[in-house]
Amino acid sequence: MGIPGSGLAKGLAVTLRTMTKRTVTEQYPDVQPELAPRTRGVIGLFEENCTVCMLCARECPDWCIYIDSHKETVPPAAPGGRERSRNVLDRFAIDFSLCMYCGICIEVCPFDALFWSPEFEYAETDIHELTHERDKLREWMWTVPEPPALDPGAEQPKEIGAAQKAADKLAAQQAKEAEEARQAAAEQAGTDQRTKDAGEEA
Ligand code: SF4
Ligand code: SF4
């Protein structure tokens, strides 16, 4: 048998110890939690980048990505070229009642069409509402944070280099066309002046 009152003393000791510790309880929803920048809340779809390659749907361990598409014939890029066919997205949906937030779909997408958004407040009372169709997945895109800045001195992403090269080429082409137009206008003005002078002399 222990000393009378020792249980009470132990209980009070625990209370005192706990009172001096920093609380970890979050007062959600009155106070919004401070989330890590790349929190896995919900998945956003940037459908302009999606080529309907089906990689995400095939790799998803839960089979909760639903994609429908059809083929469309595209005219040749240049005269005399061959017609091409491309996949057109009809449906893209993710069932978040099955998703386990593993991120595999985002990792495997070769065309940067899927992104994590930190938004997490999309609980529903009807489980069917947790299947988000493409319009809703697109809406989530606007909540995706900017990618973190590159380290100082880091190599530029190759997409930016390629886009810069294309922009420089276009600018050079436009400058050349403008110069040719300017020269043509100057020559035309000279011809008009000579014709006018010849008319006056006659
Ligand atoms: S996060 Fe994982 S489980 Fe969820 S849709 Fe993507 S691959 Fe499937
Ligand atoms: S992996 Fe990317 S590009 Fe391919 S179907 Fe999925 S979202 Fe679209």
Image (spheres, grey):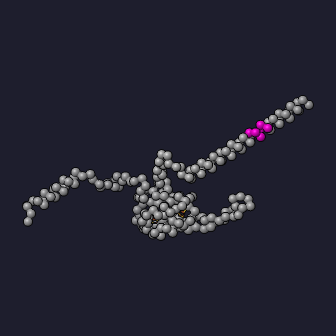
Measured from the top left, where is residue 147 in percent x and y? 48, 52
Measured from the top left, where is residue 90 in percent x and y? 57, 65
Q: Residue at x 69, y 64 (%)?
A: 83
Q: Residue at x 67, y 63 (%)?
A: 74
Q: In the rendered structure, does residue 183 fall within the stretch colored magenta?
A: yes
As drawn, 167 above or below 111: above
| Range of magenta residues | 182-187
Measured from the top left, where is residue 46 in percent x and y? 53, 58
Give the side of residue 69 with respect to residue 42, left or right: right
Give the side of residue 82 with respect to residue 42, left or right: right
143 or 190, which lies in front?
190
Q: Residue at x 50, y 63 (%)?
A: 108
53 or 153, which lies in front?
153
Image quadrant, ligand 2: bottom right
As drawn, 171 above or below 120: above
Q: Does residue 135 appear anywhere in the picture?
A: no
Image quadrant in which the C terminus is located: top right
Looking at the magenta stretch, what is its main secondary structure? helix
Q: Which residue is drawn at 8% across and 65% down?
A: 1
Q: In the rendered structure, does residue 116 fall within the stretch colored magenta?
A: no
Measured from the top left, where is residue 200 in percent x and y? 88, 30
Q: Does residue 87 appear anywhere in the picture?
A: yes
